[in-house]
Each structure stands twice: as C-alpha cells, then as structure tokens.
Amino acid sequence: MPFTLPTLPYAFGALEPTIDAQTMEIHSQKHHGAYVANANKALEGTRWADQSPEAVIKALGEIPDDKRTAVRNNAGGHVNHSLFWTVMAPGDGGGGVEPSGALSDAIKDSFSTVQQFKEQFTAAAMGRFGSGWAWLIYHPGEKKLIIASTANQDNPLMGKAVAGCEGVPILGLDVWEHAYYLKYQNRRAEYVAAWWGVVNWGVVGQLYAKAR
Ligand code: MN3
C-alpha cells in the first residue's frame, strides 16, 4: 500500500489566529502531499513499498544508496507532518493548556519545570538555522525525555543518521519557513511563542505513554 495523505483532524482555519487557514491548507495539502508522492515514487517496486513510513525511516541505512536521500527527505517529511498535525488542536484540544499526569512528571524529571522545558524547546526551535524541526523525544535507553532539533525532514526515529537525537518523538514543531511565513514572515520567535497555545497535550501524553 502506498503512503496516503492523512485527513486533518480539524478544519484548515481551526488553529486561527495562531496558524492561518491558507498556511494550513497549503502546508498540509501541497507540502505534505508532495512528500507523500515523492516517497511513494522512491519506494515503488522495492520491498519497502508495503512497510509503514515509520518502519521505512527506522531502516534508513538499509535503503539502497540511490534512493536513500529521497526516502530520508520524503518519508521523513511524511512521518514528521503526520505527527505535527495531531499534536495541535483548537483551543485546549481537550488535553488542557499544560501537560498533565505522567507526562508532566516526566517533563519535570528531565527539565525541572514545565517553564524550563518550554524555554529549552523554544531555544532548540530558534537555534535551528534554516529548515528543520524541534522535538521532544523519549530516549528509551536513558528512559528520559530529551529536546533536540534536526535539519530538513530528519526524524529522531532515523537512529544513527541523527546521532544525538535518537528516540521516539512525542512532540514536534516544524520551523521551516513554509510553516509560518505567510503570517509571521521572518518572525519565527512569534510563531513559536504562539504555537504553545495550540499544542494538544492530551495527544502528547498518549504518545509518551505509548513510547515508554
Ligand atoms: Mn512543513
């Protein structure tokens, strides 16, 4: 089964004013759509064509050399955006305006306070030069949460290919300009600051429970 573009769990304008409807439509349909189409093209006819996108990017080192970069960028882009849409929600998304329960405890274990976690995550998002992502990652070896940033469409599931950022992503923030330029232009800091208001902590908590 080729990869398919997921249906957004909300309307294009649902995250207004934080994320404008036009950005959401172009980003989810055209940008993510292109990653899906190009990943399918790269994997067509290979034994990877029937695997899940997560399985494909975990096995990046086994992908044939002539396809590896296309798969890294496009299957990576597919996994990244599929996560991104689900970790956001209108209002408090039913998950509260702050992390709660076991997720809150884990954040405090790793970063002392939720505020310090947000500051470190924001610094990772702001420190990514050019295009990439900021992540909250569960590190299975150390059994703790870490913050990292990756370039392009790299994902923590890529393992050795993203040394220092390996693990299970439970929250991701797209800091490519295509994610914010129409509304925020060059003002990435404003985008990141506003974005905290649409994080779906209920889903992040579920992803943390699944990752452990
Ligand atoms: Mn994007």
Image (cartoon, rainbow, N blue to C red):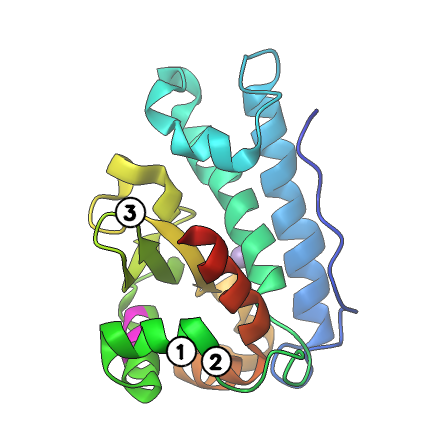
Kindly identify which numbered label has been placed on residue 104: 1
Q: Quadrant of residue 11?
A: bottom right
Q: Residue at x 24, y 72 (%)?
A: 110
- Report the side of 29 relative to 149 (left or right): right
In magenta stretch: residue 176? no
As shown in the figure, which amino acid type bears the numbered disc 1? Ser
CB contact under 8 Å: marks 3 and 1: no
Q: Is residue 18 visible?
A: yes
Q: What predominant SS class does the magenta segment belong to?
A: helix
In the image, the segment drawn in magenta is: 120-124
Look at the numbered discs 2 and 1 and tell me whether their residues touch, using CB distance below 8 Å.
yes
Q: Estimate how packed mark 2 is, as few (under 14), some (14 to 19) or many (20 or more) residues with alpha carbons within 10 Å.
A: some
Q: Is residue 209 above or below residue 120?
A: above
Q: Quadrant of residue 95?
A: bottom right
Question: Which residue of the protein is positioned furthest toward the right in this rendering?
Answer: 11
Q: Position of residue 98 (x, y in %)?
A: 49, 85
Estimate the spatial distance between the alpha carbons at disc 2 and disc 1, rounded to whole Å.
Answer: 5 Å
Q: Could one spot residue 176 in this view of the protein?
A: no
What residue is shown with label 2? 100
Residue at position x 48%, y 31% in the image? 55
